[in-house]
Image (spheres, grey):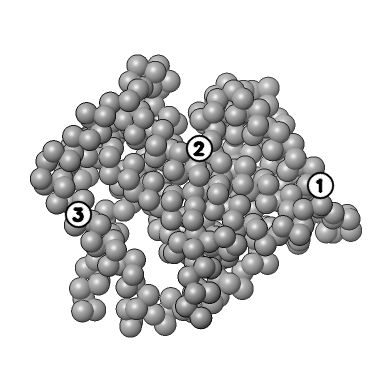
Amino acid sequence: MKYFYILFFIALSYIIPYTTSAHVLYLVDKEDATKKGGVDYDFILSPFMDIKNVGLMLGTIVITLLVLYNWHKIPFLKKKIDYVCNRASTYKVFIPWILRLSAGISLIGSGVSEVLISPALKGFASFASLEIFLGFMFITGFLVIPTALVSMFLYFLAFQIDPYIIGNLDFFAIVLALIIVENERPGIDDLIGMPHYSPFKRLKSFVPFIMRMGIGGAMIYLAIYEKILNPHVSEIIVREFGLMNVFPVSPEMWVLSVGIIEFVIGLFLLVGFKTRLMSAVAFVVLSGSFFYFGEDVASHITLFGVLSVLFITEGGSFSLDKWLSRKSK
């Protein structure tokens, strides 16, 4: 039985890193995206007409469910898993630092690249200096709450320009959390004794909920918008990067599978189900996709920040994890 589970993990480690991509519009020319945009239900539903694809989907679902419900019961892993989870819970003191680093590096990367929050919003050189300045303010821990408020304004401005910025809802979640959490060390504010006051600090326990809404909402939005409502745009990525050579299925199957996986992981994170496991899986998935597609990691660092926080905190308030935990007692 032990070796049976090992085979499951080996199979997942091969499949998962190549079954998703990050923001598709980051990699596709805007003109091509406009031409290829639009709904095509015949395209996205065509994999269900092939019995091999249906069998592959069902097999993947079975394997995933087996791993999901039994991974923590594997004798040779349980002790190490328990140790890692217990140690992760002691890292809560680092959450403000993780949030600040994530927001800071993301803003500096956006400023250097002359984009507004997202690589999808190119050509905003007029905001570059401001973004770089805000990024350094976050990293150094100086005037964190005012910096977060200005960063939130930039996100709303970006949303007015292009609603696609919903795909970067993780950035908004981090900025909102920085307004709530105490500005703990290390930071200039702490060194100089800057008074830290947030009218929302009583909401500190809701930070995991905010993180889940950010990352889960972004992943669900991207799954629906990019893979379901604009499948041919995602198809461009499949063909240009030769993904059919990585895993030999049709472009239609690739797009549908990516959309389903991204939606399911996003949904699990959104509702807080198996939060720590899902955050670890998503971390591996995103890392694999960024290396494969050669994307700018700085612009996605907030994703890793949110997932790191959720790995530390688990689901928190209003999560299925917490509800199931109470029910089992």
- Separation of marks 3 and 2 at Cα, in angstroms: 29 Å
Q: Residues within 10 Å of mark 3 (few under 14, many from 20)?
A: few
Q: Nearer the viewer, residue 1 or 208?
A: 208
Judge whether residue 110 can be spotted in this image.
yes
Identified at 50% across, 37% down, the residue is: 167
User: Which residue in the structure is indicated by mark 2?
Assistant: 167
Local packing at callout 2 (Cα closer than 10 Å; few below 14, some 14-19, many 20+) is many
Identify which residue is drawn at 73% across, 43% down: 148
- The residue that mark 3 highlights is 58
Give whichever of discs 2 and 1 has the lower sequence position: 1
Residue at (21, 68) in percent of width and height: 7
Relative horizontal placement of residue 327, taking residue 4 as reference (left or right): right
> What amino acid is found at the position of numbered circle 2 in the picture?
Gly
* Spot occupied by residue 197 in the image (x, y as percentages of width and height): 85, 54
What's under tag 1, amino acid-wise? Leu
Q: Look at the numbered discs 3 and 2 and tell me whether their residues touch, using CB distance below 8 Å.
A: no
**Closer to the camera in the image, 88 or 228:** 228
Mark 3: which secondary structure? helix
Is any part of residue 239 visible from this angle? no
Q: Residue 143 — which label?
A: 1
